[in-house]
Amino acid sequence: MTAGRATTWVHAWDEATGRDRATDAFTASYGTAPDGVWSAPGRVNLIGEHTDYNGGLCLPVPLAHRTYAALRRRDDDTARLVSAWDPTDAVTVELAGVAPGTVEGWTAYVVGVAWALRERGLAVPGFDVAVDSCVPVGSGLSSSAALSCSVALALDAVGALAQDRAALAADCVRAENEIAGAPTGGMDQAAALRTVPGHALLLDCRDQSVRHVPFDPASEGLALLVIDTRAEHALVDGQYAARRATCEEAAALLGVPTLRELTDSPARAASALATLDDGTPEGGVRMHRVRHVLAEITRVQEFVALLDAGRLRDVGPLLDASHASLRDDYEVSCRELDVAVEAARAAGALGARMTGGGFGGSAIALVEAGSVEAVADAVDAAFRDAGLRPPAFVA
Ligand code: GLA
C-alpha cells in the first residue's frame, strides 16, 4: 500500500442552492423569472440489478444529489433549453417536429418527455427551461433519469396535467427508449419519481407496484459509501442492449413473457436453466445470464426480508453474492468495479457490489459509520496501486 492522499468527495447541494442555481441560469438566459423550479434525484440501487427489464424486483434509494429544472410555460409550440454547465449552448426545438431520431444528446431527455406526454393525448405547452444538477454525469447514478423526471414534474405542473408519478415515470421511460434511444428498463425513472427519503423503493417491474421499505443505515451505526470509479467504457449502450436482448430471447425460447415468470417456483427455475444449457456456446451464455437474473430477484426478496426484520447488518453476503453474479454470470463488471468492491471489503465493509448497469460507473459498500473515511482511503489507495485514475466518493 502507498501512503494516503486527499480523496475526492462529490457533495450534494442543499435544495435552496439547487433552486437558486437553476433560477439564476434561467434568468440569465431568458431575462425573466421561471414559473417554478422542479427537481428529481439520482439513485443508487441497493440490489436487484438487470432485473427491471425482466419484470423483476429492484431496490433503489434516492441520492441527495438532484437535478433542478427551472421552467416557464410559453404560449407557442417552441421549447428553448439551456443547461448551466454549458450556458452558451442554448437549443431551440419545435415540439411538433419531435419524433424518434430527430433529437440528440441531453436535449432528447427533455423534449422526449413533452413528446411522450403528447403521445398520450395530453396538452403540453411550449416552454423555456434551464437545468442544473449535482448528480454526477456518466457515473451510473441516473443523471439522465433525474433530468427527464425533473422536466416531467415541471411540465405536469405548468400544463396542469395532474398525472400521477407512476404515469410520469412511464412517460420518461418512453422518452428515453424512443427519443433518446437508450433501452433503459424503468428502475431509474421510478427511483427519480417514486422514492421517499429514508426509504428504499421495492419496485415490482411486473406491475410497477411499489413498497417503501424503511432504510436508515445511520440508525444502526452504518453508512452506505458510494464509490464512483470514474471508469469510462466504450460500447456501454451496445452491451446493455445485448444483455437485454439475450434475456428476451431466452424468455421467448422458454415460452414466458418475462424471466420473472420463472421465479414462481424453484423447480420451474431449475428446469428452465437446464433447458437453456443445451451444450452450445450460445446456450451456455443464455443459461448464465438467466441464472443471474433469477438469483438476483431472490436476493432482493431476501434483502427486503432482512430490512423488515431490522437486520441491515446481515445483508453483506447478499451484496457480495450480487457482485459475484454480475461479474461472473452476467459479465457486466470491470476491473475498476472489482478493485473498488474488493478494497472496500478488505478495509472492513460488511458487503459491497457494483450498482447500476455496469461496465464502469459506481459501486456501493455498506460500512461502519465510523470507518467511512478509512474505507474511502483504502479504496483510493487500491486504485493508485492498481494504476487506475482516482475514484470519487459521492456523499
Ligand atoms: C441501467 C438502466 C436500468 C437498469 C440498470 C441495471 O441503470 O437504466 O433500467 O436496467 O441499468 O439494473
Image (cartoon, rainbow, N blue to C red):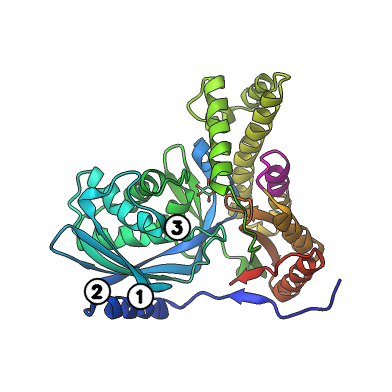
Which residue has dot 2 on it? Answer: 34
Residue for badge 3: 144
- Looking at numbered disc 1 in the image, what kind of residue is underneath it? Ala
In terms of secondary structure, where does tag 1 sit? helix
Please give the name of the residue rendered at 67% of the width and 26% of the height, measured from the top-left corner. Answer: 282
Mark 1 near ligand 1 (CB under 8 Å)?
no
Judge left or right: residue 288 versus residue 185: right
Start and end of the magenta stretch?
321-332
- Mark 3 Cβ and ligand 1 under 8 Å apart: yes
Among numbered discs 3 and 1, the one appearing first in the sequence: 1
Residue nearest the observer in this picture, 331 or 101: 101
Give the residue at x 47% y 61%. Answer: 143
Note whether residue 255 is visible.
yes
Label 1, residues with CA under 10 Å away: few <14, some 14-19, many ≥20: many
- Quarter holding the C terminus? bottom right
Residue at image position (27%, 79%) is 27
**Vertical placement of 138 versus 48: above or below?**
below
What x and y, as percent, mark residue 36? 26, 72
Q: Which residue is mark 1?
A: 22
Give the dominant element type of the magenta stretch: helix, strand or loop.
Answer: helix
| Sooner in the amino-acid sequence: mark 2 or mark 1 | 1
State the separation of the CA atoms marked 3 and 1. Answer: 17 Å
Find the residue positioned furthest to the right. Answer: 1
Instruction: Residue 100 in the image: state x and y as whole percent.
Output: 33, 43
Q: Is residue 208 above or below residue 135?
A: above
